[in-house]
Image (tube, rainbow, N blue to C red):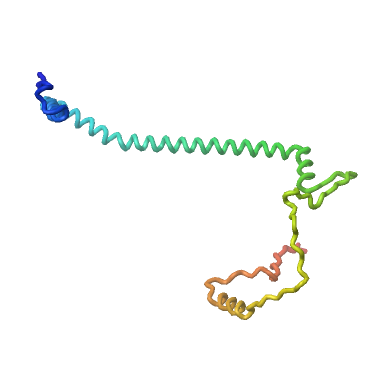
């Protein structure tokens, strides 16, 4: 195939002549492609293979992602177990238990004197100008009747009753008496 191109002097403009020539070349190239029956069958088999394998590959990728997530979860759990075992080993050490009892519960050994400092605030935390305490007694008007009425209406329209636990003694659990 020979290419037919116009000389540059014969063109109307550089852009005007290039576009139709490119289209003509594309048509000429597409016109030269011929599909045989074998090529069509092979193309059909490739499309069929893609359609058959796509769900399988998708499932495979999804399962690999789940496996990776589960492996990461197992690794995190192993790290937590290792941390808990280290903490258990610390608590099995009598010196650590003694230090924690002194620090948290302020325990001292017999014969030791413990000093507890009260109000050991930093300078920044100490209030500069505390407000003076007023000697005047202020009374506020309380709407006790409205509060009582709202409480009665609220209790009467409630769908479920609240369990009262204040002032109600616990029922004693039955004890077994030994048989004589």
Q: x and y percent of residue 113 in the render?
A: 88, 46
With 66 as the anchor, is 136 left or right in this view? right
Please tell me which residue lies in front, 176 or 141: 141
Taking the view exactly as shown, the residue that stands out farthest to the top is: 2
Taking the view exactly as shown, the residue that stands out farthest to the bottom is: 145
Res 95 → quadrant: top right
Q: Is residue 149 visible?
A: yes
Please tell me which residue lies in front, 123 or 99: 123
With 109 as the anchor, is 7 left or right in this view? left
**Residue at image x 26%, y 36%?**
51
| 26 up-or-down from 83: above or below | above
Taking the view exactly as shown, the residue that stands out farthest to the right is: 111
**Residue at image x 52%, y 38%?**
73
With 56 as the anchor, is 95 left or right in this view? right
Query: In which quadrant is the C terminus drawn?
Result: bottom right
**Residue at image x 73%, y 38%?**
92
| 83 up-or-down from 15: above or below | below
Please tell me which residue lies in front, 62 or 140: 140
With 39 as the anchor, is 158 left or right in this view? right
Q: Is residue 33 visible?
A: no
**Residue at image x 82%, y 47%?**
107
Q: x and y percent of residue 65 in the render?
A: 43, 36
Please tell me which residue lies in front, 78 or 148: 148
Q: x and y percent of residue 68 in the render?
A: 46, 35
Q: x and y percent of residue 5 in the render?
A: 11, 22
Res 94 → quadrant: top right
Query: In which quadrant is the N terminus drawn?
Result: top left
């Amino acid at each position: 195939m020979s290419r037919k191109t116009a000389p540059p002097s014969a063109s109307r403009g550089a852009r005007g002549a290039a576009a139709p020539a490119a289209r003509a070349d594309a048509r000429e190239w597409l016109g030269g492609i011929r599909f045989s029956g074998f090529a069509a069958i092979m193309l059909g088999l490739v499309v069929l293979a893609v359609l058959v394998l796509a769900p399988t590959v998708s499932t495979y990728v999804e399962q690999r992602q789940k496996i990776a997530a589960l492996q990461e979860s197992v690794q995190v759990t192993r790290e937590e177990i290792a941390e808990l075992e280290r903490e258990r080993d610390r608590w099995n050490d009598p010196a650590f238990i003694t230090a924690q009892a002194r620090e948290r519960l302020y325990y001292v050994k017999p014969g030791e004197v413990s000093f507890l400092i009260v109000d050991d605030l930093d300078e920044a935390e100490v209030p500069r100008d505390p407000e003076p305490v007023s000697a005047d007694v202020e009374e506020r008007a309380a709407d006790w009747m409205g509060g009582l009425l709202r409480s009665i209406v609220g209790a009467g329209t409630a769908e479920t009753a609240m369990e009262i636990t204040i002032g109600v003694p616990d029922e004693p659990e039955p004890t077994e008496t030994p048989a004589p």
